[in-house]
Amino acid sequence: MSITSRLPALDVATASPEQRRVLDAILAGPRGNLDGPFLAWVHSPELADHAQRLGAFCRYGTRLELRLTELAILFTASWWQSQAEWQIHEPIAREAGVSASLIEALQEGHQEPTFERDDEALVVRLGHSLYTTRRVDDALYAEAVEAFGEPAVVELVGVFGYYALVAMTLNVFAVRRGDGALPFPEPPVRPSRA
């Protein structure tokens, strides 16, 4: 599937040795492609190198079920209105078992979607609290630790943080995937002030 960006395309023939090393590592890893933020990050090989390793852990290595990881990613994509993040992860979340009704509610921006599973409601409540208040209160924290265990809660916070970085990268560099149909309306961008 085609990917576009406001950055110039990287020409492998003229890439620096550091860029080629990072490209090889990304392509040899569990992703096997340059989807998403990597088209931007490869312009800074050091960032790309560290970010791709963290991302591989957040996506494939946590104690969380893939369904919950992908739900946290979709929640983040919805929160940030990140077009490519949603385009990439929506089918993965669906395949991992996130219900069509929950996916639709997140895409439409419903603040209180209907949940079929308590663990999914907990992931969304954590994400909402974290993004809205930049904190998680004691009761919600205790509930999350009881449900997932403390190490998994640490990892879930890492998933939210990493995919917020991904969303910001994709939004700033206008990364788009596919035929041009976007999952979210593009918000107006205010001119920056000097």
Image: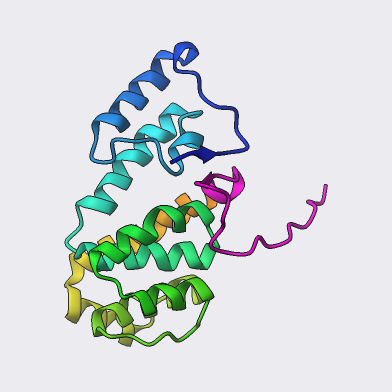
| Residue 162 visible in the current orientation | no
Q: Residue at x 28, y 53 (%)?
A: 58
> Does 50 appear above or below 22?
below
| Residue 35 visible in the current orientation | yes
Determine if the magenta segment contains residue 149.
no
Q: Position of residue 100 (x, y in %)?
A: 35, 74
Q: Position of residue 186 (x, y in %)?
A: 65, 60
Q: Position of residue 59 (x, y in %)?
A: 27, 53
> Does 24 appear above or below 169?
above
Toward the right, the furthest residue is 194
The one of 191 and 133 positioned closer to us in this rendering:
191
Q: Position of residue 188 (x, y in %)?
A: 73, 61
The N terminus: image quadrant: top left
Q: Give the magenta part as a residue range.
A: 170-194
The one of 34 and 56 positioned closer to us in this rendering:
34
Report how many numbered discs are placed on residues in the image. 0
Please give left or right for residue 24 compared with residue 79 in the image. Answer: left
Q: Residue at x 77, y 57 (%)?
A: 190
> Does 65 appear above or below 34?
below
Determine if the magenta segment contains residue 188.
yes
Q: Residue at x 58, y 38 (%)?
A: 5
Q: How is the image coloured?
A: rainbow
Please give left or right for residue 73 compared with residue 81 in the image. Answer: left
Residue 36, by quadrant, is top left
Toward the front, the furthest residue is 179
> Does 103 appear above or below 166?
below
Q: Residue at x 50, y 46 (%)?
A: 177
The one of 48 and 97 positioned closer to us in this rendering:
97
Most frequent secondary structure within the magenta stretch = loop
